[in-house]
Amino acid sequence: MRGMLYTRYELLRAIRNRRFFFFSIGFPLILYFAIAAPNRHVNNFSNSGISFPLYYMVGLTSLGTMIAMISTGTRIAAERQAGWTRQLRITPLTTRDYFRAKILTAYMMACLTILVVSLAGASLGVSLPAGRWLEMAGLILVSLAPFAALGVMLGHLLNVDAIGPATGGGASLFAFLGGTWFPLSHGFLLDLGRLLPSYWLVQAAHVGLTGHGWPLRAWVTIGVWTLLLALGAAWAFRRDTKRVA
Amino acid sequence: MRPEASRESNRALELMGPGIQIAGLSKTFRSPEGPVHAVRGIDIDIPRGQTVALLGPNGAGKSTTIDMLLGLTPPDAGSVTLFDREPRAAVDAGLIGAMLQTGSLIQYLSVRELLTMMAGMFPAPADVGEVMAKTGLERIAQRRTQKLSGGETQRVRFAIALISNPDLLVLDEPTVAMDVESRHEFWAAMREFAARGKTVLFATHYLEEADQNADRVILMARGGVVADGPPTEIKGRVGFRTLRATLPDVPVEELLALPGVGAADRRGEAIVLSCSDSDQTIRALLERHPAARDIEITGGALEDAFLALTADTAETSK
């Protein structure tokens, strides 16, 4: 109850932070138009049976939402540097309230990203049945859980100087290996990709397109990554709050 | 100075249960140059209602002591009790308000929004409007936190410390970023808080601030408590008063032989004596050298006591 007020102000702060807002939502949008608009008439991209605008709508939704989640780290690192995390520690705000605010803010940004990129897709002729779109959005939100934990972990582990390259590099790598940019069809890259949460994030989006359900393996992979990264985030938080600023 | 009446009421409140109890508190940090003994087993007992200055140079252990007091840093040994509770429990009950040494504010909220958010975290917070009035923030209530000057930011941080309606205010070098006027207003607000029978502990290396605003000064150096008492007593302990007079033709050796003189200096016709007991010195001086005139005795500043006391420990610790 008390923690919800904090969450509300965190959301307000995220919305008012124009640069953060622009780069979180504008970046995937601009990238999407830059890549998909010139190829909007390609109907069977790379023999995947999916149209080019649709493939990249899915790809950039997964990339954009992933960045939105990880960028929690940037905001936490900045608050730590400002001494604000210490200020919060001398209030009754619990660790749970704190994490909930951070994670809900990240999810709000992710939801906006899904919405905006989907609208951009629609403007390039992509059309999906409402049920499929909802299924896609739902599975994307599930597969973002490990990235929420990753953002919190990096935010408590790294300082302001290191956090930019770490989140940018981390997101690019996850996106590349997860098949955001081109379909992973066979071989080592596919085997590797199937071990990563970003692969299943992209697949979550594909599920919405093809109507095939998420395999058990997806749930297990996302579950394991979420657990491990949440433990990592808890460890980083404890380590961080023990140290003298 | 605080009016005498409120000092009286403070004394009455001292009888109402325990305030801050620090016993055997120690903290050692590891550093590349070896262990740093930031705090070496200190004992401090502060009754409810007292205003106490924690005075010392950088590295004396003031901030580490405050961090342990607030539960931000776990001590290696010893204990802290605030109003009969563990630090964390006292914080959760909203009994403690603190202004930490470093800290800026989170951005993209107005002053009023930020204070409303903070107030919402505590069980029985103060009224946001009232706190803003007390800390002079009404004029900038709608301004976003990232647009504030350094002094305004400090005032908001002070308001945050007051927002839980605390019984104890802990301030770690609160006036560092303030201009003269802000400083003046800040101490006035702090004294008003203390006059309601609340307890205040502030760290400072501004000796004048400790002298003017505290009932009691705890002098720290090298992780230990070097002196503890009312500002006047701290000064009296070393007792540096300076006696100046015009007195030609008396050799320095003879001046040094006067009772209560620690050091003597001749500057042309004038003499300057550093006295540990200036009352004795002046009597003897007038008896032995009736020609002395233009006599002037000035009280030592806390700064002198500070230098003398910390120099002492520097020698004994070698």
Image: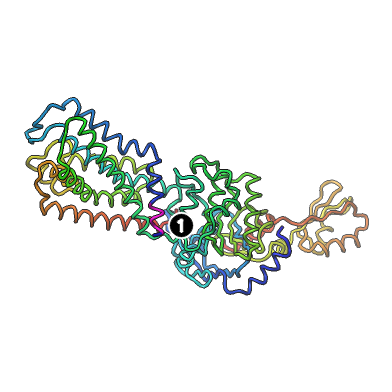
In the rendered image of this protein, does residue B31 appear above or below residue B178?
Answer: below
Which chain contains the residue that carries disc 1?
A: B
Residue A4 covered by magenta stretch: yes
In the image shown, does B288 or B215 lie closer to the viewer? B215
* Amino acid type at mark 1: Gly
- Residue B169: give x, y in percent of width and height: 56, 60
Residue for point 57% across, 49% down: B155
- Residue B245: give x, y in percent of width and height: 86, 52
Kindly tell me whether residue A89 is visible in this rendering: yes
Quadrant of the rendered image containing residue A240: bottom left
Question: Which residues are drawn in magenta?
Answer: A2-7
In the image shown, does B243 or B259 lie closer to the viewer? B243
In the rendered image of this protein, does residue B18 appear above or below residue A91?
Answer: below
Farthest residue toward the front? Answer: A130
Question: Residue beneath label 1, please?
Answer: B120
In the image shown, does B165 or B22 lie closer to the viewer? B165
- Residue B165: give x, y in percent of width and height: 54, 61
Task: Count neighbours of disc 1 (C-alpha within 10 A) and say few if under 14, some if 14 to 19, many if 20 or more.
Answer: many
In the image: residue B278, left or right of residue B65: right
Task: Label the magenta part by its dominant secondary structure.
Answer: helix
